[in-house]
Amino acid sequence: MMLSETEALPSPIKQGENSFDGLLMSTNLQANDFTLSGFDLDIPKVLVVDDHAASRMTAMALLAMEGYEVIEAENGSAAIEIIGRSQPDLILLDVMMPEMDGFEVCHLLKQDEHT
């Protein structure tokens, strides 16, 4: 069966309580329900480490738009210093950087029992 540009097949998905939109809304409501006890419910802190400023700024902007607290470092040495005082929840780490590469940062973090 050939369709012209203005014809379309009817959708097998019915709008209503079993629709995909309802599933997304339900999932979002559950994700934003902070009823857990015994957990730190502060805004997650993400450290973005990249020597390329444009990449770092792009990642920071996207994370900030999603509601994360974002901190930055332009090299591995600065990242180690920031991690020691800020203790981020997540680190986005570029592997190829001058001075101290991402592998060395990971190695140092793994050796430190506080990180």
Image: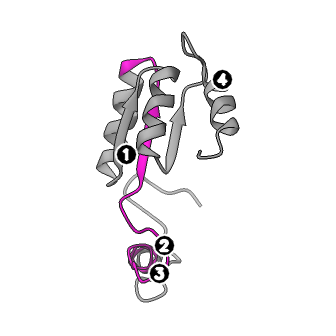
- CA gap, disc 1 and disc 2: 22 Å
Magenta stretch bounds? 24-53
Say which of marks 1 and 4 sits in front: 4
Q: Secondary structure at mark 3?
A: loop
Kindly give the residue lying farthest to the bottom in the view shown. Answer: 17
Q: Nearer the viewer, residue 20 or 81?
A: 81
Q: Amino acid at mark 3?
A: Leu
As measured in the structure, the alpha-carbon distance from the residue carrying label 2 to the one carrying label 4 is 31 Å
Q: Which residue is mark 1?
A: 63
**Which amino acid does the dot numbered 2 rest on?**
Phe
| C-alpha distance separating marks 4 and 3 | 36 Å
Q: Amino acid at mark 4?
A: Glu
Q: Residue at x 44, y 64 (%)?
A: 8
Are the two marked residues, 2 and 3, in contact with CB atoms closer than 8 angstroms? Answer: yes
- The residue that mark 2 highlights is 39
How many discs appear?
Answer: 4
Tag 4 near tag 3, CB within 8 Å:
no
The amino acid at mark 1 is Leu
Left or right of residue 100: residue 64: left
Secondary element under disc 1, as helix, strand or loop, is helix
Gap between marks 3 and 1 measured at Cα: 23 Å
According to the image, label 3 marks what residue?
A: 36
Q: Whole-percent x and y of residue 106? A: 65, 32
Mark identifier at residue 104: 4
Q: In the rendered image, which quarter contains the N terminus?
A: bottom right
Residue drawn at the location 35% of the way across and 43% of the way down: 70
